[in-house]
Image: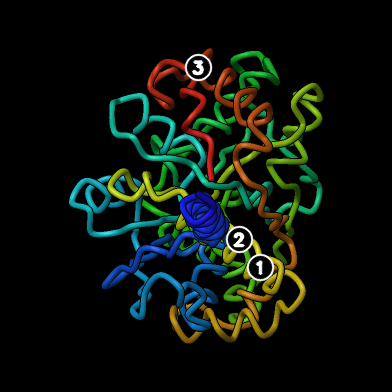
Amino acid sequence: MFRPLLKALLLGALCMAAASLPARAARYEKLTLAGPTAVVTFPLLHMVETQALKQYTDKLEFRLWQNPDQLRVLLAKKEIDFSAAPSNLPALMANRGDPVRLLNISVWGILWLVSRDPAVHGFADLAGKELLVPFQRDLPAVLLDTLLQAQALPPEKAVRLRRTRDSQDAIALMLTGQGQHALLVEPTASLLMWRNQQQGGAPLYRAQSLEAAWRASFPGQADLPQAGIMVNSHLAHDIALSRAVDQAYADSAAWCSSHPRDCAELVHRHIPHLPVAAIEDAIEVTRLDSRPANTIRPQLEALYRLLGEQHPQAIGGRLPDADFYGP
């Protein structure tokens, strides 16, 4: 009578031991990370060089995208698995029925007003002046429009926005004196100042970050979660992988922040048209602080509500569901 009981006890102990073992990670033939030429991308390049996801794949790759429209196509074709993205884009996609998830936010300040006028110390000094803006429908344009609306300037004092084709066009106009003020995302702002110095041009001034102006206009929601990492819909079910990517990215972001020169040299190897000095400057002036999206949901929802009031099409007309916030 004791033998069946002993057998049952042993079987139960084995089952409990098996249950306590960590689940074996899923393996993938290849994982592709992606991002734009921006500071939010730099930790992804460090992840590739250090092969940070060895537990999940032997082939970790990186792909550069040029604009949000191209990113949407790459995501739809499932050609990329994880990507840096402006914080509104994954919300827009999720609300349109594509179950992507936002893993984290790492960039809280990346837009800079650069001016040739030493008397321009911030956006408040642009009344009646022309501002070059290389953004059309993406998040920086929405944030700028919202900020300028909050200033409530009379029509005759309104800032005149000159939409350029892209950031390189804005840089060219500034370098040739055809533009006096520009709003640029890092590392483009640092690249402009570096090129201007190399050419011996008249001084340029890093007047104010959009985030500093934002805090003054919206003190109740001073944090501006601008960009982070999203997981594509076909891998959103693998929560363990998403957590691993989030942790690896946070580690790489911390490394870039504490080793700006080494990070700049690493980025230059992948994006050689960016000079090391400009990349280093961009890292040093950018608030790079990776936080899981589910821990900063209130800050994200505050931004989404504001965008929903001003530009509902930027987030798909409503707040994302709770399971959108990863990892």
The image quadrant of residue 194 is: bottom right
Q: Which residue lies at the image location 36% right of the left edge and 24% below the top edge?
A: 95
Q: CA distance from mark 1 to mark 2?
A: 6 Å
Q: Residue at x 78, y 32 (%)?
A: 215
- Contact, CB < 8 Å: mark 1 with mark 2? yes
Q: For the residue labelled by badge 1, is the local secondary structure a helix, a strand or a loop?
A: helix
Q: Which residue is mark 2?
A: 247
Q: Is residue 177 visible?
A: no
Residue type, numbered disc 3: Gly
Residue identifier under label 1: 251
> Residue 208, relative to residue 213: is it above or below?
below
Do the numbered discs 1 and 3 sit on residues whose CB atoms are within 8 Å?
Answer: no
Disc 2 marks a residue whose amino acid type is Gln
Give how far apart the Cα atoms at labels 2 and 3 are.
Answer: 30 Å
Tell me if I can see residue 106 in this picture.
Answer: yes
Q: Quadrant of residue 17?
A: bottom right
Query: 294 or 74, which is in the foreground?
Result: 294
Q: Which is nearer the eye, 280 or 14? A: 14
As drawn, 277 above or below 134: below
Image position, residue 113 (x, y; %): 66, 48
Q: Is residue 81 left or right of residue 6?
A: left
Residue at position x 33%, y 35% in the image: 99
Q: Are marks 2 and 3 in contact (CB under 8 Å)?
A: no
The residue at which mark 3 appears reads as 308
